[in-house]
Image (cartoon, rainbow, N blue to C red):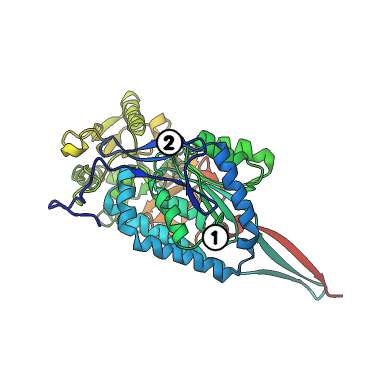
């Protein structure tokens, strides 16, 4: 149990180091060559965990185990597979506080974000796909008394699931759950930057009684472990969430091997505020969509487009709200923003803020590391929520993904201009539109090149809906039936009736 100190911060033993192991063939194991990598707590800058620095041979063993487990697992009745997933979901729920604390320490996110949103969502991912596969519709096409076609869907074999550091357990389980529910076996690779909660998931999978080899988790670098999963001939399916640059490399390897790939990549999401927007109602959302999880959510809005008639009013209210956000110890209930995931990422964010200034932007607030932090966090990686004004559409700051607590605000005069600006980036993941005129909202939504358009809301997620991006934001869709289709191979059976 975690002791809670007077100021509400769970007690942290700074000397404590968590050891994470791979899950291969039902056992917790070290890397074959015995190497270890270190995971840094971004709030303190100190090592808090070590993980197996695995290599290609570790992946090969995991793939062999997954291949061996496939016939039995895919042959189980659906309700039995779903029962396994529900047990795992229950174990995630009963370990919520432990997982949330570890996620916060590993990633820098606030404890509240991990406890209230991300860990419960990891459990929901398993529960949702356990139910979705049980209720999956079947397809039958009749041909006027001549023939009946029905479509069989079978699991594809071993699925490679590769995930990023921003929502570690949430996104890893979003891939593992549908893969397992549909009868595939899995070799998963969490980000080496945030391996901790995947280490606990491995323990919980054993406790849930998942048969050996059904779920394997291999830790290590993308260029070794990730690369080997993608190029392994016995892994026909790869689902990847991460940067557009790595997604491109994965396509280059997997394409000529005719693998099925799903790529969930970067974003540069617009938030459109129309002249009739209810700013009081919208402001909570816009502040959250800009700075939740330090802006390290692929769905965060990073370009706010405001109708020029409301720009001054919007800026007054928005800046007042942003200046009130508290950056601090991720474990403190007082903090609205925690730490940036790594020193390297903090430096990348800083270089983009410098670029924004060089490109002629005005820093309306933030733009620096915070001056006052608790002693425990003095070597941590923190950045103030930052708002930039006055940049042209075409500049790099408005075109490239920063993936941090930095938003750029631009004005527009017509709705056509707002839509053009919204679409005029290489990405197309998500968009928000704030207006009281729903007919206009529908018209605009139909012209936005993005996988999700939210009208008067942000981050409302129904797991049945297709999730994914246009253009450089990705290939394919996750969620609901799209995920069940992705992880299965159809065979049409045609029965002659004549
Ligand atoms: P990243 O691309 O650097 O790494 C993602 C994963 O890929 C990690 O596990 C990494 O080890 C692995 N990897 C690296 N090189 C590899 C290779 N050659 N072969 C196979 N695997 C390899 O991304 P990141 O920095 O961890 O995450 C941030 C990015 O993820 C941002 O661009 C963000 O927009 C994106 N993201 C997208 C979504 C979405 O749903 N579209 C969700 C979350 C994050």
Q: Which residue is mark 2?
A: 36
Give the residue drawn at x 33%, y 23%: 358
Residue at the far left: name it: 6
Check the image and report above or below for 144 versus 491. below
Q: Quadrant of the C terminus?
A: bottom right
Q: Nearer the viewer, residue 149 or 59?
A: 59
Q: Position of residue 108 (x, y in %)?
A: 30, 43
Q: Earlier in the sequence, mark 2 or mark 1?
A: 2
Give the residue drawn at x 38%, y 55%: 459
Q: Which mark is residue 266?
A: none
Q: Is residue 357 left or right of residue 319?
A: right
Give the residue drawn at x 43%, y 58%: 204
Q: Nearer the viewer, residue 463 or 206?
A: 206
Q: Which residue is mark 1?
A: 211
Residue 488 appears anywhere in the view: no
Residue 280 appears anywhere in the view: yes
Q: Answer yes or no: do the residues labelled 2 and 1 have beta carbons within 8 Å? A: no
Local crowd at mark 2 within 10 Å, few (<14), some, or many (≥20)? some
**Could you give the CA–CA distance between mark 2 and mark 1, rounded to whole angstroms?**
27 Å
Q: Quadrant of the N terminus?
A: bottom left
Residue at the far right: name it: 498
Q: Quadrant of residue 363?
A: top left
Q: Nearer the viewer, residue 305 or 283?
A: 283
Check the image and report above or below for 398 versus 112. above
Q: Is residue 436 left or right of residue 330?
A: right
Q: Position of residue 233 (x, y in %)?
A: 66, 43
SS at mark 2 in the image = strand
């Amino acid at each position: 149990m975690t002791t809670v100190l007077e100021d509400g911060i769970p007690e942290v033993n700074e000397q404590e180091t968590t050891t994470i192991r791979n899950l291969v063939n039902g056992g917790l194991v070290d890397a074959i060559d015995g190497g270890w990598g270190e995971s840094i707590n971004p709030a303190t800058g100190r090592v808090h965990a070590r993980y197996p620095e695995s290599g290609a041979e570790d992946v090969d063993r995991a793939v062999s185990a997954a291949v061996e487990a496939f016939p039995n697992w895919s042959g189980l009745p659906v309700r039995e597979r779903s029962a396994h997933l529900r047990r795992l979901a229950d174990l995630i729920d009963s370990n919520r506080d432990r997982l949330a604390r570890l996620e916060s320490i590993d990633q820098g996110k606030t404890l509240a974000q991990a406890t209230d949103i991300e860990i419960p969502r990891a459990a929901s991912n398993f529960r949702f796909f356990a139910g979705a596969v049980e209720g999956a519709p079947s397809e039958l096409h009749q041909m006027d008394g001549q023939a009946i076609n029905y479509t069989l869907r079978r699991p594809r074999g071993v699925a490679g699931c590769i995930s990023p550091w921003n929502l570690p357990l949430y996104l890893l389980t979003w891939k593992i759950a549908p893969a397992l529910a549909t009868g595939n076996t899995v070799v998963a690779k969490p980000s080496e930057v945030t391996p901790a909660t995947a280490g606990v998931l491995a323990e919980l999978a054993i406790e849930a009684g998942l048969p050996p080899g059904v779920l394997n988790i291999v830790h290590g670098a993308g260029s070794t472990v990730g690369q080997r999963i993608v190029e392994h001939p016995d892994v026909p399916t790869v689902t990847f969430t991460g940067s557009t640059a790595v997604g491109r490399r994965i396509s280059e390897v997997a394409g000529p091997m005719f693998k099925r790939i799903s790529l969930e990549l970067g974003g540069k999401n617009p938030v459109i505020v129309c002249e009739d927007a209810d700013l009081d109602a919208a402001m909570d959302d816009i502040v959250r969509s800009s700075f939740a999880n330090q802006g390290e959510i692929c769905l965060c809005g990073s370009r706010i487009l405001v109708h020029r008639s409301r720009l001054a009013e919007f800026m007054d209210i928005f800046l007042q709200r942003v200046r009130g956000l508290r950056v601090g110890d991720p474990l403190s209930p007082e903090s609205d923003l925690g730490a940036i995931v790594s020193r390297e990422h903090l430096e990348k964010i800083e270089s983009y803020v410098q670029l924004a200034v060089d490109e002629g932007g005005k820093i309306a607030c933030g733009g620096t590391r915070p001056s006052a932090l608790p002693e425990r966090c003095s070597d941590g990686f923190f950045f103030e929520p930052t708002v930039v004004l006055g940049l042209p559409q075409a500049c790099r700051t408005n075109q490239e993904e920063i993936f941090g607590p930095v938003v750029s605000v631009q004005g527009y005069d017509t709705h056509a201009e707002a839509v053009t600006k919204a679409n005029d980036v290489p990405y197309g993941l998500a968009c928000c539109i704030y207006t009281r005129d729903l007919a206009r909202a529908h018209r605009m939504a139909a012209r936005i090149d993005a996988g999700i358009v939210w009208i008067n809301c942000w981050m409302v997620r129904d797991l049945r809906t297709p999730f994914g991006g246009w253009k450089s934001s990705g290939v394919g869709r996750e969620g609901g039936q799209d995920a069940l289709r992705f992880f299965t191979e159809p065979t049409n059976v045609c029965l002659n009736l004549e």
